[in-house]
Amino acid sequence: MRHLTAAAVIALVGAPAFGHHSQSMFDTTKELVVTALHPGVTREQVVENTGWPLRFADPLGETPAPTADELSTLRDLQRRTAEAHSQGAA
């Protein structure tokens, strides 16, 4: 699966209060604060893949791993999306 940059993935709706990135989760008031890292991801990886200075929460949490059902749903969506895009190119 391809990962997007933080800028491409963080979705801010209305007044920003929360964001999600392929490696971590954010909370924001006046700045984005990394509140949790995804399993196996380091602070250094998040910093290297983000285009602005970051502040990390203390304590810094870890997001739960996806369930088998969530992974199955995402893989099915990825498969259907790939099929839809290949049909449009034909």
Image (cartoon, rainbow, N blue to C red):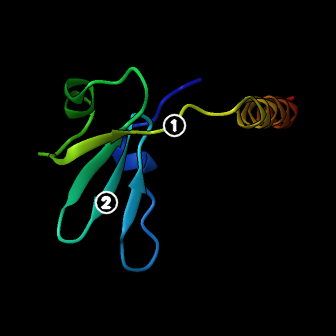
- From this view, report whether residue 35 is shown above or below residue 76: below
Residue sitting at x 45%, y 39% = 63
**Residue 23 appears in which quarter of the rendering?**
top left
Q: Position of residue 90 (x, y in %)?
A: 87, 28
Q: Which residue is mark 1?
A: 64
Residue sitting at x 18%, y 63% = 31
1 or 2: tag closer to the N-terminus = 2
Q: Position of residue 14 (x, y in %)?
A: 43, 79
**Residue 19 appears in which quarter of the rendering?**
bottom left
Residue sitting at x 23%, y 57% = 32
Label 2, residues with CA under 10 Å away: few <14, some 14-19, many ≥20: some
Describe residue 43's horizontal placement relative to residue 23 as left or right: left
Residues 17 and 57: in front is 57
- Distance Cα–Cα, label 1 vs label 2: 17 Å
Q: Secondary structure at mark 1?
A: loop
- Quick one: quadrant of the N terminus? top right
Describe residue 47's horizontal placement relative to residue 41 as left or right: left
Query: Hey, which residue is sitting farthest front in the picture?
Result: 59
Q: Secondary structure at mark 2?
A: strand
Residue type, mark 1 in image: Pro
Q: Which residue is mark 2?
A: 27
